[in-house]
Amino acid sequence: MDFIFFGMQGSGKGTLGKAVAERYGMQIFETGNELRKLSHEESELGQKVKSIVEAGNLVPNEVVMEIVENFMDSIDPNSPILFDGIPRKVTQAKNLNEVLDKHNREYKAVLLELSEESALKRLTTRRICKTCKAVYPATYTEENCKCGDTLTTRSDDNPEAIKTRLQAFQEETVPAIEMYKDKLITIDGEPSIEDVQTNTFEILDKIMLD
Ligand code: AMP
């Protein structure tokens, strides 16, 4: 069973996705990372993706789907996949579902739900390590990262940029999530990371371990 992970910025989706993938031996397709990898290539496509990502725009669907298909071809077909950061909009959801159907994959969508107010609070108070990119919530009061380096705020974690990202989620991603309503598992993202993880495992164990 594959999972398509949804959650607005600040919901803790990335952290939860990693824990889920580890528990069930899943391969993670992390869209932003895959695109960043491609943008380091000298090829024409690599350079095109680089300029789009640097401008903060969405990479065209055909390119993203090609990367998804290459990823699926590169892994053990029996290994479940956790999709993170895709789909971001309705047209991409349609394309992704076509690819999944073509490969006879079974899938469910998981939505980590959080209020916009909580997301704003988390995003404006979180800090990130300059070196290892670990993210720390406001409750982490040490000056330095566990790796020893300095913590800083992300340049796009200012209130204006955050509002723009949250608005894009509401306007473009929420309608895409709607398309999965028959396959959707909703998880409350408001509690602590530990509690969210425990609740998620309780729900997903029934699907993955039975
Ligand atoms: P992220 O790491 O999710 O913040 O994504 C970084 C950048 O990758 C975004 O600003 C987009 O340029 C691109 N990107 C990530 N996910 C997608 C997607 N599903 N479709 C198109 N472009 C994407």
Image (cartoon, helix red, strand yellow):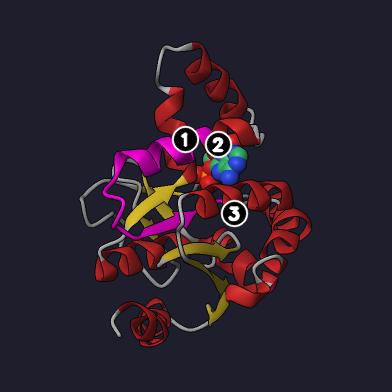
Q: Is residue 191 above or below residue 20?
A: below
For the N terminus, the quadrant is bottom left
Camera-nearest label, 2 or 3: 3
Badge 1 vs badge 2, beta-carbon distance below 8 Å: yes
Q: In this figure, which residue is indicated by the disc labeled 2?
A: 64
Is label 2 within 8 A of ligand 1 (CB to nearest ligand atom)?
A: yes
Q: Which of these two is toward me, 195 or 31? A: 31
For the C terminus, the quadrant is bottom left
Amino acid under disc 1: Ile
In this rendering, does residue 107 appear at all?
yes
Amino acid under disc 3: Asn
Q: Is residue 80 magenta?
A: yes
Magenta stretch bounds: 66-86
Along the polypeptide, which appears first: circle 2 or circle 3? 2
Q: Residue 157 in the image: x percent, y percent?
A: 58, 50
Neighbour tally class for label 3: few under 14, some 14-19, many 20 plus, Cα within 10 Å? some
Q: At 55% across and 36% down in the image, what residue appears? A: 64
Q: In this figure, which residue is indicated by the disc labeled 1?
A: 67
Q: In this figure, which residue is indicated by the disc labeled 3?
A: 97
Q: Is residue 182 left or right of residue 189?
A: right
Badge 3 vs badge 1, beta-carbon distance below 8 Å: no
Q: Is residue 75 above or below residue 170?
A: above
Amino acid under disc 2: Val
Q: Residue 26 in the image: x percent, y percent?
A: 31, 60
Write down the quadrant of residue 73 in the picture. top left
Along the polypeptide, which appears first: circle 3 or circle 1? 1
